[in-house]
Each structure stands twice: as structure tokens, then as C-alpha cells.
Amino acid sequence: MAQFYQDASINGIAADMIGAAPVQQEDRELDGADEQVKDILGNNADYDEEAEEKRYYRRKKLLTIKSVISASLAAAITYGVYLGLLQMQLILHYDETYRDVKYGNMGLQDIDNKMLMGINVTPIAALLYTPVLIRFFGTKWMLFLSSGIYALFVSTNYWERYYTLVPSATVIGVMIVPFWTSIGNYITRMAQKYYEYVNYKEEHVREQRRAPQGASHKYIIIFQSIFYSIFHLSFVLSQFPVYFFLNKFLNSYNHTLFNVHECGASIQHGVLPKGFNVTVLHSLPPSISLIYVESVLMGAALLAMLLFLVLCGSAYRPTEEIDLRSIGWGNIFQLPFKHFRDYRLRCLAPYFLYSGFEVLFACTGFVLCYGVCSLGLEKLPYLITAYGLSASAFSALGLCFLHLPRQIPLTGGAIVHMCILIALFFWSPQPKLQSQGPALYVIAVLWGLGSALNKTGLSILIGMFYEDKERQDFVFTIYHWLQALAIFIVYLWAELPMMAKLGIMLASALISILSYLWMERKIRSSCRPRIPKIPAPRHKMKGYRYLEEENSDESGSEEGNESGASEVENDEAEQPARARRRRRTEEHCYVQAVEEEKEEE
């Protein structure tokens, strides 16, 4: 052996072995690094999987609550800006001096009439396109786009012309029903997701199966109550332009009500009393001040858009959104009409209509014909603020659904309104009599109580009846389309006498209560509703995740092998098509991963 090593050293082999010593040392260093990596990636004694899972779902629950509050604030800001600007615009355009000095013979009143027509008439067609828009864009993006349309309406008021105001108002009418449908669907979905995060250990949640019936009712009640408690503050926000800007330009009630001799039920025509002064401003507001106010409102509208975009999470998983729009656009178009087969929706339809009547009557009929007629235009923001604060505070009564039978809060709101309507039938306040103020504020507060119970109760009831995420947008479309139809009817009856309006309101409230109680009777008698079937998703994607049964990649040789084929190939051909596709997908992913590693090296 010694001779062998001596010969090897002579031949230069020993020199190579000396040069290989650093290589062995480097291998030992790599082995040490591998051991450190194994220590890091191995079982960590301090790692508590259950605690980490609990923290993860706690973060998910907080994100869901943040999304609900952000959506509620964004909706309140959006409608506060819209209603505030519309109110300020109509007051300014009503003043005869403002029209003549600022715009001459441009016909501002005619523009306002056509603008109101665009807002109130176009939602009639919303039943045709609302589900298609929501399924195409998604719930969250529909909220964002709708708030953008409201911001567009604000921007057109910088340049008040027919070709800016009327088209923007018409587009708002187009987006009213999609916006409200998306809001109702979004809040309900957030409640269902919160239930999943709370009960993440349940087997049906882990397997993404349908939850037991009634499991998420508690969270639907809580989240809808939170939403309406925040949203009704939009009536308060809408009065900020009048509080901080327009109020100092308004004439006192002695001037505006100088020729007014009758109020309330005695009014025979229109929404304003006969003899109401056509000059309500004692001085014209500067144009630069109007630009400042509109810029603040524009900033608030953009803030609402950012709240929807940044702070609101998605209502559905990406795969769920794909499934929702993969049932076919024809089916999406038809399903809202097919849901009218359900007797529950047919029985609730009068209640849906009444919920649209009562809000418009509070903001126009009562506030103008009773409040402004007796207290003056300068008290208009205070009456609407009392109504908004009352509705916001009493929306928390929606939590009564947790402990009381649902008939009590649902019928309670309409019963309160019926009592007020009967009182208004027999009371006509005296013009310019300020001592009637406390009674009018009490009526505004009580009307807010009824509105809160109606709005919160109906949204909760829909969420409880229709828990399937595949049909919620269709049902909320019907609800808010009927509300929009009621707003159109209020627009048509604007010129009727006040007694006729009170009679229609009282009849609709009574019919809605009786129809709802009839529905509850049918439910107690175990009458099964006729709910349309939702078609199964039909995926047309070309990616490997959505391969269809008849895959173009499958060759005929896999199903019918020649006689010389091996046994392994015969076994492959006998396996189900889905298993073969899954295996090919895994092989494809493995090959891609190997190629990426080679490219990195």
C-alpha cells in the first residue's frame, strides 16, 4: 500500500487529494446549514397551532366588523352629500331673484322638474338590469361604481346647465336600485361570513357546505341594526350645507309665510302651501362660496368612494363570484321574476311599497306642508335632523328580533305611523305660530321611530328568509325595486290634496300590516313557499382548474388502447376522467416547479 501511495504521489494523484480537502470542509458546512434549516422548518416546540388559528379568525372577525362599519359610513356620507346638495339646489332655484340674476331666462325650474323626473322615473326599469350588473361587477365593485355616480352628480353642479344636470340625475336614477341592492346583499353576506369565522371549527364550515337553517340569524339582526343606525345619520349630514352656509341667506318666516293662510290637511294642491313667497333669500350667496361648498361635498363623495374601495372587504370568495355569474346571463335576467312565485314576497310587496311611501312623505309631505308651513323655511333643517337622529337611535330596536316575536317590531312601525296619520287628518297647524314647534318635533321623532322599525325589520326579515347566497341579490332587487316604484308613485301624486295623500298613506299602511300577518299565518300552517331552483354553474374557463368532462387534451388512445398497449396504460384508461385530469394537473404543476428551480439556479 505504501508503494501504491508513493506511486500515486509521483503520478500526481496525491496532489489532487490535497486539493479535495477544502471541498470536504465545504460539504461539512453545508450539512450544518441543512441541520439549521431542519431545525427552523421542523416541529417547533413553542408553536401552538390552535392559538394561531384562533388569532387568525379573530383578525377575520375584526376585518368583517370594519367592513360593515365602513360600508355604513360610506353609504351615509354618499346619501348625505346627495340629499344635501339636492335640497340646497332646489331652495336656490326656487328663489325668483336668484334665477333672474344668476341665470336669466335659462329655465332653471324646468331643468329641476326634468331632473326630478330622471331621478324618480328611471328606476322603474331597474328590475331588468340590476342582477346582471351586480353579477357582472360583483357586490363590492357595484357599491364603488354607484358611489362614483353620486360623485358625478355633485361634480355637474359646478356648471349648472341642462346638458349637465339632467343626464347626471338620470344616471343616478339608473343606479339607485343597484346601489341599495348591493348594500342589502353586502351586509347580509358579512353577517354570514362572521358566523363562519365564529364557528370555524364546525365541520360544515371547514368543508364550505351550507350552514344549518337559522344559524346566522343572530348576526344578520345585529349587522342590519348597526347599518341602519349609522345610515340614518345621512339625514343629519344632509342638513350641513343649510346649517353652515344657506341659513344665513334665508328670509325669516314673517316674510316667506306672509301670504300663507292654511297649512297641513287644509292644503288643496302641491307640496307647498298656497301663497308661499317666491323670494326666500334676503341676499344672493356669492358664487365663490357656492364653489367652496360644492368642493367640500365633492371631497366627501370621494371619501365615500375610498371607504368602499379600501376598507370594505369582498362579499364573496373569487370562486363563489365565478360560480354566481356562471349560471348563465339569461337565467340571471329571469330569476328576479321567477322569485315572485314565492308567496312570502307577494305578501311582503305592500310592505315594500309602504316603506318607500313613508320616507318620501316624511321628507316632503309632513316637513313642508306641516313644518315649513307653520314654522318657516329656516326650521326645515331642524325638523329633518330630528327625524334622522330619531331613526338612527331607534334602529337599535332591531335587536328586539333576538328576544321578541318578529311580528311585534315589524307591525309596530306601521302602527305608529297609522296613529300619526290619523292625528294629521284632524290637525291643520296655524301659519307663523311658533308655539306649535314642540308638537311638530315630537311627530318627527315618532315618525323616525316607525321608519327605523320598518327599514331594519324588512331587511332582517329578507336575510332570515333567504339565506342562500345564490339568491340574495335577486330578492333584495325585488325589495328595492318596489321601494323605487313607491317613490315614483309619490312623485306622481305631488299635486294631490293633502287629505288624499294622507288617505293613501293610511290605506297602504293598513294593507301592508294585514298582508304581512296573512303571510305569517301561512308560515305557521306549514305552507311551503315555491322557490325557483338556481341552475348549476357552467364554467367555460380554459385553465386547468376548470377543465370540462370532454377535454380536448384527452386523446382517443386513452380510452381505446391497441392490443400492444401495456397493462399500466390499460389501468389509466379505466380510471375516471376527473382523476386523470387531477393527476395530469399535479404532474404539470410539478414540472413547472422543477423548471422554475432550474431557472433560479
Image: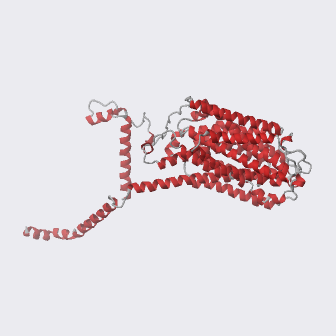
The answer to whether 147 is drawn above or below residue 136 in the figure is below
Task: Give the total number of marks visible in the rendering.
Answer: 0
Q: Return the x and y of residue 116 as percentages of the image width and height.
A: 77, 44
Which quadrant is the C terminus positioned in? bottom left
Q: Can residue 259 be spotted in the picture?
A: yes
At 82% from the left and 46% from the top, the residue drawn is 370
Q: Return the x and y of residue 371 as percentages of the image width and height.
A: 81, 49
The answer to whether 140 is drawn above or below residue 540 in the figure is below
Q: Can residue 75 be spotted in the picture?
A: no
| Image side of residue 20 versus residue 298, left or right | left
| Image side of residue 223 versus residue 28, left or right | right
Q: Toward which corner of the image does residue 53 lie, by quadrant?
A: bottom left
Which quadrant is the N terminus positioned in? bottom left
The answer to whether 154 is drawn above or below residue 523 in the figure is below
At 56% from the left and 38% from the top, the residue drawn is 466
From this viewpoint, which residue is outermost toward the right?
Answer: 259
Q: Nearer the viewer, residue 212 or 160?
A: 212
Q: Nearer the viewer, residue 196 or 425?
A: 425
Q: Return the x and y of residue 311 as percentages of the image width and height.
A: 57, 55
Q: Return the x and y of residue 305 as percentages of the image width and height.
A: 64, 53
At 59% from the left and 53% from the top, the residue drawn is 69
Q: Toward which corner of the image does residue 10 lie, by quadrant?
A: bottom left
Q: How is the image coloured?
A: secondary structure
Q: Nearer the viewer, residue 238 or 288?
A: 238
